[in-house]
Image (tube, rainbow, N blue to C red):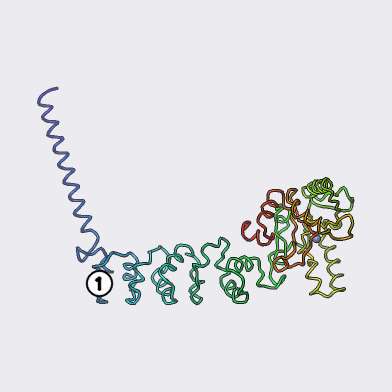
Amino acid sequence: MNRKLKIFLSILLIIVLISLIIITIIKLITSDSGKNKTNETSNYSDTAVEAMKEMNLYGKINNAEYSKTIEVLLEDQELQEKYLDDYYNINYTNITNFSTTINELLDKDYSSEEINYITENMKNDINILLNMEHVDILAFQDLSNFDINNLERYLAYQEENEDYDLATVVTYVNIGLDKEGYSEYTEYTNEEAQNDLTILVNKYHKLPDDYEPNDLIALSYNSNYYLRKEAAEAFEKLTNAGLLDGVIFYPFSPYRSYKTQEVLYNRYVERDGQAAADTYSARPGFSEHQLGLAVDVRSNTLSDNLTPEHYEWMLDNSYKYGFIVRYPKGCQHITQFMEEPWHLRYLGVELATKVHDSGLTYDEYYDLYMK
Ligand SMILES: [Zn+2]
């Protein structure tokens, strides 16, 4: 290579390098001075420094560790000296009205730990807490079905039921048990009822008056007994499995229309009074039988019940064919119906197995795992 060209290229390279160094130095200088600091030793913004000076807290705050929370409070003119130690333990989060919210929570005796939990996990619902007295909010943190919209109801229900642990309180309130059955309920659409075989029907969840499953088929036992196709086929398998174990049972009340349920329920009310009828018969629209996914079974030796042996067999085996015993013994306070060993609900094998293994009623299981 030409010697002159080599020298020229070397000089050019040196010039480029020097330019780069100069640019870097300029950048460093401008970025340092570009933060609008009144004092070179402060990490806080001008506005914040001004505010701390006004409060005679400049030395105290500026010499301590930088806190974004404190900076924002100062900028918002919301810093309260009495809470200074708490502020240092509170993480800044980008919520609306951060400063006033923090102060209001501190006024309500929330600890910095609680406040950090609240601002991280309940961003959009803090107003609920601001409208209430202090709540031991961390006690709820491991409960997956906790719903802050029900918080006041949890507290009221807990007071009335001191022997329930918090997990039970949350689940029972979510089910609706703090309110009289039928007093408040959600109503499904026909589509929801038709398309979801796992649908929960109880005194808090109603079917449309005109809901009728579109795939009812007759059971082999009686051509006037209907269930939805999938449930009917599963029921035949269940019956055969029972036969193999010497457990002989028959269906005696399968699908019932809204109209049939109405006639039945009214007859019971006339006979026993409404309060009594409500413990064993669902009001029209609230019966699983209207789903075409429930069937009452009787032992071959009984007219409308299972023998204790057959009931045990049903508890241990029906889930294998997709059925659960929907109103088991000892669960009346949850299901809101007296025990009905004979009432089976079809959920499909997978879900029925999970519900069986959980040991929970379907009402509880639904709240904990299906929502
Ligand atoms: Zn039944």
Q: At which x and y percent is residue 118?
A: 46, 66
Residue closest to the far top: 1
Whether ligand 1 has any atom under 8 Å from the Cβ at mark 1 is answered as no
Q: At which x and y percent is residue 79?
A: 33, 74
Counting every numbered tag in the picture gives 1
Disc 1 target residue: 60
Q: Secondary structure at mark 1?
A: helix
Q: Quadrant of residue 41?
A: bottom left
Of 91 and 307, the residue lying toward us:
307
Q: Quadrant of residue 300?
A: bottom right
Lateral position of residue 280 relative to residue 167, left or right: right
- Name which residue type carries label 1: Lys
Lateral position of residue 34 relative to residue 325, left or right: left
Q: At which x and y percent is residue 157?
A: 61, 74
Q: At which x and y percent is residue 158?
A: 59, 73
Quadrant of the image for the C terminus? bottom right
Lateral position of residue 240 relative to residue 141, left or right: right
Q: What residue do we see at 49% from left, 67% from top?
A: 138
Of 136 and 43, the residue lying toward us:
136
Of 46 and 202, the residue lying toward us:
202
Q: What residue do we see at 84% from left, 72% from top?
A: 269
Quadrant of the image for the N terminus? top left
- Ligand 1's quadrant: bottom right
Residue closest to the far front: 309
Callout 1: few (<14), some (14-19), or many (20+) C-alpha neighbours within 10 Å? Answer: few
Q: What residue do we see at 83% from left, 64% from top?
A: 261
